[in-house]
Amino acid sequence: MNIILANPRGFCAGVKRAILIVENALKIYKKKIYVKHELVHNEYVIKRLRRKGVIFVEKISQIPNYSIVVFSAHGVSKQIKKEAIKKNLIILNATCPLVTKVHKEVSEYSKKGIETILIGHKGHPEVEGTLGQYDNKNGKIYLVQSTQDVNKLSIKNTDKLNFVTQTTLSVTKTQHIISCLKNKFPKICAPNKEDICYATTNRQKAIRELSKISDIIFVIGSKNSSNSNRLAELGREAGILTKLINSFVDIKTKWLKNIHSIGITAGASAPEILVKEVVQYLQTLGANQSVKTIGFEEKNFFKIPQKLLKIQTYKNKMEKNNE
Ligand code: 0CN
Ligand code: SF4
């Protein structure tokens, strides 16, 4: 059996930044760190942070006043931010800058009273956060999940209408929904720059290539990770047996009967160590030692908030002075 790795795979810049924010906060504040929702949708990452003392909560009311709260990479609504301020929490915002970009657009449309359509999955925390940027005073924000939803949609003023999307959707399915929107509302305005993020787009391209040369594909990622699920869907749509796995432990040897090429990729929230473990496990089952990689390296990088950097530099100086 040959092993082929897709590139890019695994951690994106937004996930790396979110984890760095929490790790720096743990070092700097030496206090309990609360995170609103799972920082990123990956079981391994969450377990590791929990072991370091991070407390994950779903509601701001679960956090004691004056504590430190980190908003997850998926972002929060304006209401959640207000609740955190009311409780005098120190807010560290780990929302991915590419989600924040969408938030700013929606907030702007809301101020101008421009009705807005969000393409996304109902109940996903990013969708909740984005819907929650629109205050529904002068207009309305509508959620659509499919072309059927577009057909059912009725809008008051179709002359002034915009759409935005969740960042981790299927590129092709979203294109279908957008064409349907444009057919129904010819004057609808698109975002300046595509909302589906670079990491989602690149990982989807890479799995398409992988599915041309694999007999089975392992997508490493957790069940609640939207972008990982979209990758698994693409593998299956290409007719390849595709398994979304948390780690090598989930692999069943019966899947590997008559398999010559094993493709491996990982969602944007899955760390590389899980990929390495899968490769090593497959090698113990007889896969070739030499591993092929296809695709290209991603070089995107997002800075962490200035606030954390400043405190870090100050603390380092103080510690040096005390040596
Ligand atoms: O798996 P993630 O935590 O989130 P979704 O794919 O479910 O949105 O990956 C990071 C993406 C973001 C925001
Ligand atoms: Fe940001 Fe995209 Fe990564 Fe989500 S998947 S954290 S939007 S870069």
Image (cartoon, rainbow, N blue to C red):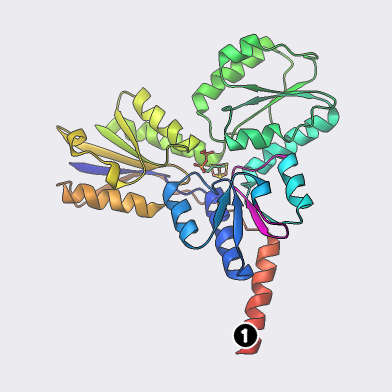
How many numbered callouts? 1
**Magenta-tinted stretch:** 63-77
Q: Is residue 98 magenta?
A: no
Return the x and y of residue 258 as percentages of the image width and height: 14, 32
Can you see residue 282? yes
- Where's residue 144, x and y in %? 62, 21
| Quarter of the view holding residue 66 | bottom right
Q: Is residue 319 left or right of residue 6?
A: right
Q: Residue at x 63, y 68 (%)?
A: 29
Where does residue 247 sit, x and y in percent of width and height?
33, 46
Q: Mark 1 belongs to which amino acid?
A: Lys
Dominant SS type (magenta): loop
Question: Against 119, is 199 above or below?
Answer: below
Residue at image x 55%, y 62%?
Answer: 23
Which residue in the protein does label 1 denote?
320
State the quadrant of the N terminus: top left
- Few, some or many residues within 10 Å of mark 1 (<14, 14–19, 20+): few
**Residue at the bottom extreme?**
323
Q: Is residue 75 above or below residue 158?
A: below
Q: Is residue 18 above or below residue 53?
A: above
**Can residue 214 be seen from the camera position used here?**
no
Find out whether residue 65 is within the magenta segment.
yes
> Who is closer to the viewer here, 243 or 188?
243
Q: Residue at x 69, y 31 (%)?
A: 131
Residue 314, percent from left and from top: 69, 75
Instruction: Locate residue 5: give its quadrant.
Output: top left
Q: Quadrant of the C terminus?
A: bottom right
Residue under the point 45% across and 38% down: 203
